[in-house]
Image: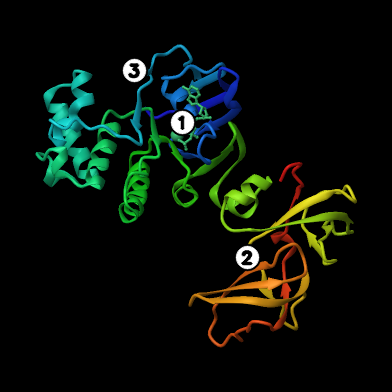
């Protein structure tokens, strides 16, 4: 039976270095949960602790509310798909997938039925008698996936399972893995450093940095409402500008002054007048100011660069701050195309302006 997973104050140290630093979260039964972060942030270490290959220095791991710290890996009933997948080269596709069931001494009839069902799910029925060397990389990866899922694991653990494949196969398998996971309903922990993959596939994402969870949320919140400067930098494109907090207006918005004197208002933010801050604004949240709108933040600037990409038009607009603003406009029929050197007014909604405390060594 698929299960929930609890990570409770888990820390892992190797000598003096802390690979996973006091991490806690709950994963619901059937959830597709992704650990996203750059190289060395502790994703694999955390996954290996869930599998039982590594013992945490402190904290607990629970399956279905039961602490499993002392349960050895082979009794945790996890299915594993790792980056350097190994399928047995001398076995056929069928026998590779049947391997886990034979090790569990299932009956021949059951093995036959379950393997055939999995073969159908991963669309390899017609290749059941091939050997791995006669398969493409994507087909081999589907064998690994089928082999991990056929034992009906409580939890499926996947560590960068697509990173060895070419772009086309990666994009194809992303949606295949996701729809397979939905059909079977297995609780899944998926590790990747690819933000697009994480946003597309996950129910929820934990963005990790230096062993800690920076933000845990559903994909669109991670994208639209980064809670830390790290997440704002890491996910998608953002204009990052430093400024100084001026104060708060009656409507609760905070006022920030940018170098060069522009004042910009952001929803939320913080109060301490005079303190240095950083703001992030997504290029596609900035629009041209039109007469008749009620603008929330109007900033004048000079266009220095234009890239016409058909559906999108990308502009660089010099506003006299530390760097020009990147602006990404929807290319609409009949839109007036700015030209380099032209002056224009931009409008930035309050909610598009995210405010963060300036980092000491940013
Ligand atoms: N067995 C070990 N002994 C000592 N340090 C280790 C060990 N395993 C991992 N580390 C260190 O722990 C940190 C986290 O490593 P981990 O493999 O979890 O990173 P990751 O997020 O999976 O990175 P990647 O995206 O490169 O796979 C790294 O600094 C790594 O050097
Ligand atoms: Mg890793």
Determine the residue located farthest toward the top in the rendered image.
Answer: 70
- The nearer-to-camera label among 2 and 3 is 2
Q: Is residue 184 above or below residue 65?
A: below
Q: Is residue 350 above or below residue 182?
A: below
Number of on-image labels: 3
Give the residue number, with chain letter if any, for mark 2: 283
Residue 9 visible in image: no
Numbered tag placed on residue 309 in the rendering: none
* Classed neighbour count for the residue bearing mark 2: other residues with Cα under 10 Å, few (<14), some (14–19), many (≥20): many
Position of residue 214 measured from the top left corner of the image (x, y, whole percent):
63, 39
Q: Mark 3 and mark 2 in contact (Cβ < 8 Å)?
A: no
* Classed neighbour count for the residue bearing mark 1: other residues with Cα under 10 Å, few (<14), some (14–19), many (≥20): many
Pick the quarter of the image with the N terminus. top left
Give the residue number, with chain letter if any, for mark 3: 74
Q: Mark 1 and mark 2 in contact (Cβ < 8 Å)?
A: no
Q: Mark 3 and mark 1 in contact (Cβ < 8 Å)?
A: no
Going by the image, does 312 lie left or right of 294?
left
The colour scheme used here is rainbow
Could you tell me how far apart the alpha carbons at marks 2 and 3 are, in whole angstroms? 49 Å
Residue 216 visible in image: yes
Numbered tag placed on residue 44 in the rendering: 1
> Can you tell me whether the CB of the residue at mark 1 lies under 8 Å from the nearest atom of ligand 2?
yes
- Name which of mark 1 and mark 3 comes first in the sequence: 1
* The image quadrant in which ligand 2 is located: top left
Could you tell me how far apart the alpha carbons at marks 1 and 3 are, in whole angstroms? 18 Å
Tell me the quarter of the picture where residue 210 sits: top right
Q: Residue at x 35, y 44 (%)?
A: 162
Q: Secondary structure at mark 1?
A: helix
């Amino acid at each position: 039976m698929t299960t929930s997973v609890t990570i409770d104050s888990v820390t892992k140290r190797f000598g003096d270095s802390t690979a996973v630093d006091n991490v806690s979260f709950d994963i619901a039964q059937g959830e597709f949960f992704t650990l996203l972060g750059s190289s060395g942030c502790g994703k694999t270490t955390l996954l290996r602790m869930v599998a039982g290959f590594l013992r945490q220095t402190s904290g607990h791991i629970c399956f279905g509310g039961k602490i499993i710290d002392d349960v050895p890996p082979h009794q945790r009933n996890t299915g594993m798909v790792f980056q350097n997948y190994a399928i047995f080269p001398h076995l056929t596709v069928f026998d590779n997938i049947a391997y886990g069931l034979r090790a569990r001494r299932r009956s021949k009839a059951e093995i036959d039925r379950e393997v055939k069902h999995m073969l159908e799910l991963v669309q390899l029925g017609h290749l059941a008698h091939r050997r791995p060397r006669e398969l493409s990389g994507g087909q081999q990866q589907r064998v690994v996936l089928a082999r991990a899922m056929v034992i009906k694991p409580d939890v499926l653990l996947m560590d960068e399972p697509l990173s060895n494949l070419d772009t086309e196969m990666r994009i194809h398998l992303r949606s295949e893995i996701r729809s397979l996971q939905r059909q079977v309903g297995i609780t899944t922990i998926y590790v990747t450093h690819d933000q697009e993959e994480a946003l597309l596939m996950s129910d929820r994402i934990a963005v990790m940095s230096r062993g800690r969870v920076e933000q845990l949320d559903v994909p669109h919140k991670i994208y639209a409402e980064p809670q830390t400067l790290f997440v704002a930098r890491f996910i998608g494109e953002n204009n990052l500008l430093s400024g100084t907090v001026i104060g708060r207006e009656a409507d609760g918005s905070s006022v920030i002054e940018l170098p060069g004197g522009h004042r910009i208002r952001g929803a939320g933010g913080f109060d301490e007048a005079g303190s240095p801050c950083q703001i992030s604004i997504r290029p596609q949240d900035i629009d041209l100011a039109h007469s008749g709108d009620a603008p929330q933040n109007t900033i004048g600037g000079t266009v220095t660069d234009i890239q016409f990409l058909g559906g999108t038009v990308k502009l660089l607009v010099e506003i006299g701050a530390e760097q020009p603003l990147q602006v990404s406009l929807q290319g609409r029929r009949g839109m007036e195309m700015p030209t380099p050197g032209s002056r224009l007014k931009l409008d930035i909604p309050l909610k598009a302006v995210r405010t963060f405390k300036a980092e000491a060594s940013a």
